[in-house]
């Protein structure tokens, strides 16, 4: 089947509890409003949201031979995500994160590292380039990729495939990997916090230019409550955040990436695709878990049109 988007890299299962003001004392318990399980991660969360927005999608990653892995696969399958490239690694558990979300939105977490960061980029993943329109690389600095990320993205661009890239954390390994990846990336999608660490500046425009000087075709900077900034050669677009009261912002960055890619796939110009991505993230933030209150592509267009923003675009 043809694909609109193939995502490669981090796939976890999030166990989100809301709201958690404090841990119960001793062995006592408390009733909470919601406990939600959902596929997440820079690859898994992005592809789950993109599928909800109507794209045909596939995930290339790995899970463990455990109940969490079975659950992730079943949730992807039920949503319509192609899991033929989702491997099972019996040597590692499935990456899992527990997130007690506080009433003010803070989200400390416990994370168990697992199979997805060790997933190899197989020949089957390279073969899938022949049936996809876009690749989202979310395995920056992962040992399982073994340097194959740049080769995959190079071959993707040679086929006319749109390439994007996001990372889970700004580590030394991630920085070194980006040096080989960025020349083959059409759009790099870091957060402002990651720009500060990796580019050494608080200025998102300057940070974007530094990544573009290293080879990236453009940058989409995720800026939290300030929305997002798109920097392309000769053009800058700022999309302000919507005026909402967020509930759970855990997957907002991944959903913004998915929203931009979905908007682009549906023919929106870069500015509108950016606004669509911000509207996608806002709907995710209004609920608990990876999808939040997100319903569909059309509902997101309506949200983007009807929901006020915090400020006018710069």
Image: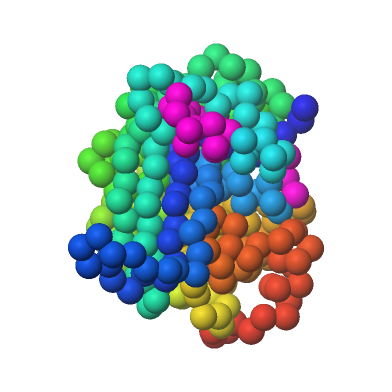
Identified at 76% across, 30% down, the residue is: 2
Identified at 50% across, 64% down, the residue is: 34
Residue 85 in which image quadrant: top right
Where is residue 28 shown, x and y percent of the image? 28, 64
Q: Could you tell me if residue 304 is visible in this image? A: yes
Identified at 71% across, 53% down, the residue is: 53
Residue 144 in which image quadrant: top left
Compared across the picture, whether 2 is left or right of 220 comes to right
Q: Nearer the viewer, residue 211 or 228?
A: 228
Identified at 49% across, 22% down, the residue is: 88
Q: Nearer the viewer, residue 59 or 199?
A: 59
Where is residue 222 shown, x and y percent of the image? 46, 62
Q: How is the image coloured?
A: rainbow
Q: Nearer the viewer, residue 63 or 44?
A: 63
Q: Residue furthest left?
A: 26
Q: Residue furthest front?
A: 28
Where is residue 159 shown, x and y percent of the image? 66, 27
Q: How many marks?
A: 0
**Rendered view: 207 above or below 142:** below
Q: Which region of the structure is painted magenta?
A: 54-73
Question: In what quadrant of the picture does the N terminus appear?
Answer: top right
Asked whether residue 195 is drawn in magenta, I would say: no
Where is residue 79 shown, x and y percent of the image? 69, 43
Q: Could you tell me if residue 215 is visible in this image? A: no
Asked whether residue 56 is drawn in magenta, I would say: yes
**Rendered view: 258 above or below 288:** above
Compared across the picture, whether 151 is left or right of 274 comes to left
């Amino acid at each position: 089947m043809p694909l609109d988007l193939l995502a490669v890299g981090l796939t976890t299962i999030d166990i989100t509890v809301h709201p958690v003001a404090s841990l119960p004392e001793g062995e006592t318990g408390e009733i909470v409003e919601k406990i939600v399980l959902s596929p997440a991660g820079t690859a898994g969360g992005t592809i789950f949201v993109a599928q909800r927005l109507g794209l045909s999608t596939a995930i290339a990653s790995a899970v463990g031979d455990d109940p969490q892995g079975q659950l992730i696969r079943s949730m992807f399958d039920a949503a319509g995500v192609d899991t033929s490239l989702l491997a099972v690694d019996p040597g590692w558990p499935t990456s899992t994160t527990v997130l007690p979300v506080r009433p003010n939105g803070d989200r400390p977490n416990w994370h168990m590292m697992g199979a997805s960061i060790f997933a190899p980029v197989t020949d089957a993943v390279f073969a899938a380039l022949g049936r996809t329109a876009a690749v989202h690389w979310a395995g920056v600095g992962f040992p399982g990729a073994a340097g194959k990320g740049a080769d995959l993205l190079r071959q993707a661009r040679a086929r006319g495939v749109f390439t994007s890239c996001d990372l889970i954390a700004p580590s030394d390994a991630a920085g070194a990997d980006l040096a080989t990846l960025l020349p083959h990336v059409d759009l790099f999608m870091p957060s402002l916090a990651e720009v500060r660490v990796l580019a050494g500046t608080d200025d998102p425009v300057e940070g974007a230019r530094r990544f573009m000087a290293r080879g990236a075709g453009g940058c989409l900077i995720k800026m939290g409550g300030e929305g997002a900034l798109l920097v392309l050669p000769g053009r800058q677009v700022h999309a302000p955040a919507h005026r909402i009261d967020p509930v759970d912002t855990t997957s907002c960055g991944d959903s913004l990436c998915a929203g931009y890619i979905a908007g682009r796939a549906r023919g929106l110009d870069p500015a509108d695709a950016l606004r669509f991505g911000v509207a996608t993230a806002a709907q995710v933030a209004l609920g608990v878990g990876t999808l939040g209150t997100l319903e569909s592509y059309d509902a997101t267009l309506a949200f983007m049109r009807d929901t006020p923003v915090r400020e006018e675009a710069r």
